[in-house]
Image (spheres, rainbow, N blue to C red):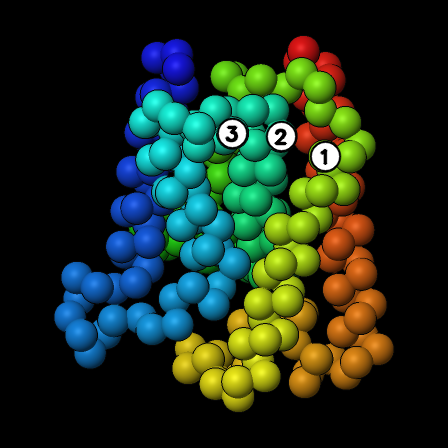
Amino acid sequence: MSTAETVFAILISASSAAGLLLVSRILEGPEKRRRQLFVYYTNLSNLAMLVTHVLLLFPGRCRELLRSPAGRYVTTLCILVTFVVYFFVLTHFGRPRSDLLRSLGVRRVSNFLVHYLVPALTVLEWLCVADKRGLGLRDAVLWLAVPLAYFVFLLLRARTGAVITAVGRLWPYGFLDPDILGTRRWLRNLAATLVGFFILGLLLLGIGRVLI
């Protein structure tokens, strides 16, 4: 593995670890510790970046799989979605606000790390050092297994009836909550989300073709 890849692996794993540590509030004591941390896609995707980039630091079969064009492609999309959904959907960017920092959601260091820095470093890693040869439409379709797996996880978790204390409901995100939307709107939002993720995958493929 090249020096640049090693540097990126260290920076990304350290940034994601720091972000998750701050988001969990473990250092603030048991009474402030954030439970149900990994119900949220943001935290799961940052955990994935932490695990995958630590594995990249050690020789072996896992490292070769993660360094493959498909492995890099899926890893990058996995965390890129975190930024895209947070910035364009959850913070409603574009609405008039008096405080730019508030609209960007960067007041908290933890927010900046998990929603901005880790995605930015991972995309930069993909642009600069990742092998992009051989990627095609099949990879863009296969990538959808990641968001679909997350949707299945949310469905199964909701069936347990355990309310997420931070939001007071069964689902972490309002735009994917069938209890709020109703079945028809929920299915429509689910389909639109998958189409959006597929288009994002195609966009990354196109950029990769240009850079080869």
Q: Above or below — where is 101 with respect to 160?
A: above
- Check disc 1 and give the amino acid type: Asp
Circle nearer the viewer, 3 or 1: 3
Residue 136 location (% of width, % of height): 77, 27
Residue 41 location (% of width, % of height): 52, 58
Is there any visible trace of residue 167 in the rendered image?
yes
Quick one: label 2 or label 1, which is nearer the N terminus?
Answer: 2
Mark sitting on residue 65: 3
| Residue 97, image quadrant | bottom right
Could you tell me which secondary element the residue under label 1 belongs to?
helix
Q: Nearer the viewer, residue 54 or 212?
A: 54
Task: State the CA–CA distance, disc 2 to disc 1.
Answer: 7 Å
Circle nearer the viewer, 3 or 2: 3
- Check disc 2 and give the amino acid type: Ala
Q: Residues within 10 Å of mark 2 (few under 14, many from 20)?
A: many
Q: Residues within 10 Å of mark 3 (few under 14, many from 20)?
A: few
Mark sitting on residue 139: 1
Q: Nearer the viewer, residue 120 or 204?
A: 204
Q: Given contact means CB atoms under 8 Å apart, are the residues at marks 2 and 1 in contact? A: yes
Residue 140 location (% of width, % of height): 74, 37
37 relative position to 91: left or right: left
164 relative position to 51: left or right: right
Residue beneath the point at 68% across and 83% down: 180
Is there any visible trace of residue 126 in the rendered image?
no
Q: Given contact means CB atoms under 8 Å apart, are the residues at marks 3 and 1 in contact? A: no
The residue to which callout 2 is attached is 70
